[in-house]
Amino acid sequence: MATQPARLELSGPKTASAMDVPPFKPCLVKAVFRDVTPMHISRSAAWAAASVTRTVLTEIIDGAKTAAAANLREKLGPEDLLSAIDRNVELEVGNKWYDHSPTFKGLTGVLYDAEGVVVPSRKRSRSRKQSAVVGAHRFEAGVKKLLRSQKATAIPAMVRELDGIASVFLTDLARDAALVVRGAERIGTVTLAMSGEPAPGPFLKDSRRKLSARRGDGWTIGRDDILAATTIQLFGANLRQRALTEAREVTHDVSAG
């Protein structure tokens, strides 16, 4: 019998490297975006968002591994996450998760209003509407896959923290990408640095610019909209530049549909 030719995989990038395949599947990314906006998200945009989320989580895991090694621990725990963020402020992402996390509870300090009165802690919503926190468990498989790829192991509490951070970060990324498509006016400028070029500088507080100078329709979130949203979400120049570069590489051969 003649051997059947190998079937081409059409669901992702054409490159074969494992690093070119983000652990968070595009279908999961699109599900998160649907929780945020009714806009259509293109295939290349979904891959870009998955890549950016992977880059962020990889940096956090690397920082946690360094902290764990310094304390002679084999498995990563929440204390290593705190150490990683303390050592590298660029890793402080997905901040909305911190209000729901036992690890970060009590670390933000007591809040006071303008009158000096203590602000009560935020109560958890009982709404059935999907949210970044409610849907955090959807990222568990991707987080575990990413940990394996980084040759790291983590206790369940650490996996939970990474789940939550990934979920909130991607939700915020989706929200900012939708704003970019709508041409919403935001404080600061958005500059998409090309690979090999110096990373963009910090946003200027007094400068305003409409994000309407984009290509495409007003209903579809494209790859460049994800890149623009990334520059908004990631304030650290090093992490931002790496995320942009890796997202471009992953989507180089991905169709825009």
Image (spheres, helix red, strand yellow):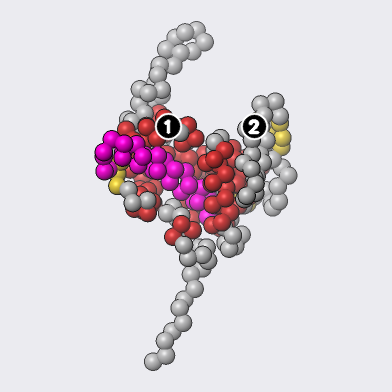
Give the image location of residue 188, x and y in percent: 66, 32
As drawn, 144 above or below 3: above
Give the image location of residue 241, x and y in percent: 57, 44
- Left or right: 64 in relation to 200: left
Instruction: Using the numbered discs, state the Cα–Cα distance from disc 2 to disc 1 in whole angstroms.
Output: 23 Å
Crowding at mark 2 (Cα within 10 Å: few <14, some 14-19, many 20+): some
As drawn, 132 above or below 47: above
Front one among 227 and 185: 227
Main SS of residues in magenta: helix
Amino acid beneath label 1:
Arg
For disc 2, the marked residue is 203
At horizontal 31% and vertical 40% (from top left) the residue drawn is 69
As drawn, 104 above or below 112: below
Front one among 73 and 136: 73
- Ranked by sequence position, the earlier of labels 2 and 1 is 1
Amino acid beneath label 2:
Phe
In which image quadrant can residue 162 be found? top left
The N terminus lies in quadrant: bottom left
